[in-house]
Amino acid sequence: MKKIILLRHAKVAIKNKIIYANELKDYIKQYNEANIIKDSNFKINTTNHKNHILICSTLKRSIQTSQLFDQKLDFSNNLFNEAQLPYTNKKLFKLPINIWLIIFRTLWFLSYNKNSQSYSQTKKRAKEAANILIKKSKENDIVLIGHGIMNILIKKELKKSKDYNVQFKIL
C-alpha cells in the first residue's frame, strides 16, 4: 500500500459575525458557496505531492483547493464532504459564529442531529470513504483534499486497517 495524505481545504473567505442560532443555516450555505483564500504558501507545499492520485470532496472549497495543485483532479466524491453541522430553527440569542459552531458540533457529537446527518451515519460514510482510499492506494500515493472533522473520521477508519500509511495535514 502506498501513502495516503489527508489535507484540509484552504481557508475560506468568509467573515466571522454575530448571529442568532437560527441564522446558522444561512451561514452554512454561505460558507459552502464561498471561495477559498488563495495562499502562496499552500501552493509551495503542493510540489511535494505531484504524481499522486488527487481526490477531493464535491464541496466548492475542496475543489478550488485541488486547483492549486499542478495536476488534474482524478476523483471527486460526496463521501468525502464535511460532516454536516446541525442547527436549530429557534432564534435563541446572538453569539459569534465560532461559538455557535463549537456548540453545535459538540451537540452533534452528543447525538443532536437536527437538520443534519447523524454522527453514526457520518462514521459509516467515513468508513466507505476510507475503503475507497485504501483501494485506490494499492497502486499510487493518494492526496485527499477534504475537511477537518471528516478527515479525522476517515483517519480513524484507516488506522483500523492493518495495511496503511497515513499522513494527516491541516492547512
Image (spheres, grey):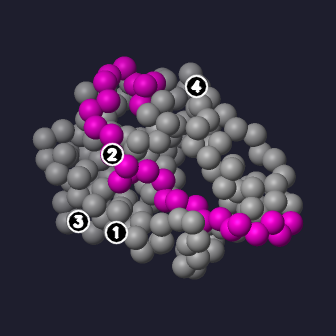
Residue at which label 1 appears = 124
Residue at which label 2 appears = 77
Q: What x and y, as percent, mark residue 166?
A: 32, 52
What kind of residue is marked 1? Lys
Residue at which label 4 appears = 38
Residue 162 to residue 79: above or below: below
Front disc: 4 or 2: 2
Residue 34 to residue 133: above or below: above
Residue 77 colored in magenta in the image: yes
Q: For the residues labelled 1 and 3, say whether their Cβ atoms are less than 8 Å apart.
A: no
Front disc: 2 or 3: 2
Q: In the structure shown, which secondary structural element does the residue marked by tag 1 occupy?
A: helix
What range is drawn magenta here?
66-93
Q: Quadrant of residue 106?
A: bottom right
Rendered image: mark on residue 161 = 3
What kind of residue is marked 4? Lys
| Residue 6 visible in image | no
| 10 Å crowding of disc 4: few (<14), some (14-19), many (20+) | some
Q: In the structure shown, which secondary structural element does the residue marked by tag 2 occupy?
A: loop
Q: What x and y, as percent, mark residue 17?
A: 81, 47
Query: Separation of disc 2 and disc 3 at Cα?
Result: 21 Å
* Residue pictured at 33% horizontal, 45% vertical: 77
| Residue with the most extreme bottom position | 110
